[in-house]
Amino acid sequence: MTDPADARLLAALAELGKVAVHELAARVGMDPREVAYRLVALSGSGLPLLVGVESDPQGLRAALAGAFPPAQPQTPNPGPYHAPPSGAVPFAPAGATPGYAPSGAVPGYPPPAQPPQAAPPGYPPPARPGGGYPPADPGRGLPSGPYQVQQGVASGPYQVAGVASGPYPAPLDPVISTWGPPQTASWARGDQRPAPPAGPRTGKIGDSLAGQGLEGEQLTVQLLEVQDPADYLFGAAGYRLEPGERAVVVHTEVTNKGPIPFVSLPDNYLELLTADGKPVAKAPVSLTSRPPHKIGVQPGETAGGHTVYVLPESTRVVAVRWSPRPEPDERSLTWSLED
């Protein structure tokens, strides 16, 4: 563990044993949200730490009920109302006295449909209007026929009382709100790098070409000198070539013209190109009389160095290529050594 804030949190928690998040945050002088986030991350790393939540169930239900009032179910439109003729008693049976209304009926409206009564056990079901009895069906309590069954709820969409439908705004994670969710442009992605700077990608000895680093660093690479062969420099540094080998020394300078520091070795992927198109990587040696490149080029700084190559004596070198990564791409720079 290298984070001093996490160490301070764990030390205070070890002293208290059990404490609320806001009390622990006040003790160490940190924001409660940051303390909660750090504790959850630490609990997932295998430490003997349990992060819990305690609440008042009744209070939470009351808060949810106040924030989301229950939706009222929709009632079907009864349609236009037609008043009965003056003095008439609607739906009065024969022989009924004026003003008669069946129990539960409202004047001017038809009475509610009554569900058919099931036949008592041991008695046949009621006959159909056309005569005869329907066959007994043990799976159904009511016989088939032109009966109007009362429905309690009209068909159609039914709204359940409770939380209203629709998107619920969940609290944002501090990491997500800062960097954005994965697989989006706000995350650092290697497959969405900025376009290389405009300008020529090829040149000759002495030319400065505009390049770009892996993090978008704005660089200028200049090929100053190519010593071929450089066997005497190789031997003066205490190295020995095998029979049939020769040494080549390349001198380059890299200038950082942007605000982003270049933290790689400038000649890490500086290669020689042979006549058959094969690259020759640099040798892991350095010369005392020709100092090598050092790691990193700060903004506004120009750094130079020498790169040593060992290759067969009969191999013809036609170009020098610089790339910010092992495989060449559109950001690679090439200097031709042929007239």
Image (tube, rainbow, N blue to C red):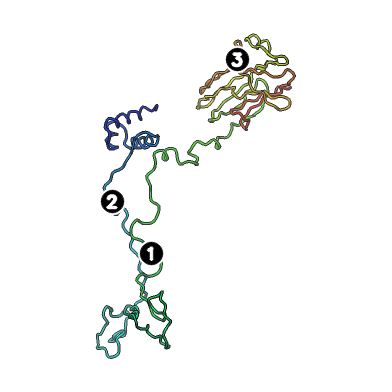
Mark 3 vs mark 1, CA separation in Å: 82 Å
Q: Element under label 3?
A: loop
- Which amino acid is tagged 2? Ala
Q: Which mark is residue 194?
A: none
Q: What residue does disc 2 label?
A: 63
Residue 265 locus on image (x, y percent): 56, 22
Q: Is residue 196 above or below residue 256?
A: below
Front in this rendered view, residue 204 or 330: 330
Residue 187 locus on image (x, y percent): 48, 38
Give the residue drawn at x 58%, y 34%. Answer: 195
Q: Which mark is residue 286?
A: 3
Question: Which of the image's four quarters has the N terminus?
Answer: top left
- Which amino acid is tagged 3? Ser
Mark 2 vs mark 1, CA separation in Å: 25 Å
Mark 3 vs mark 2, CA separation in Å: 73 Å
Disc nearer the start of the sequence (3/1)? 1
Q: Is residue 84 above or below residue 198?
A: below
Give the residue drawn at x 45%, y 40%. Answer: 180
Q: What residue does disc 1 label?
A: 158
Disc nearer the start of the sequence (3/2)? 2
Front in this rendered view, residue 177 or 302: 177
Q: Is 20 on the left or on the right of 336, as rendered?
A: left
Image-quadrant location for residue 229: top right
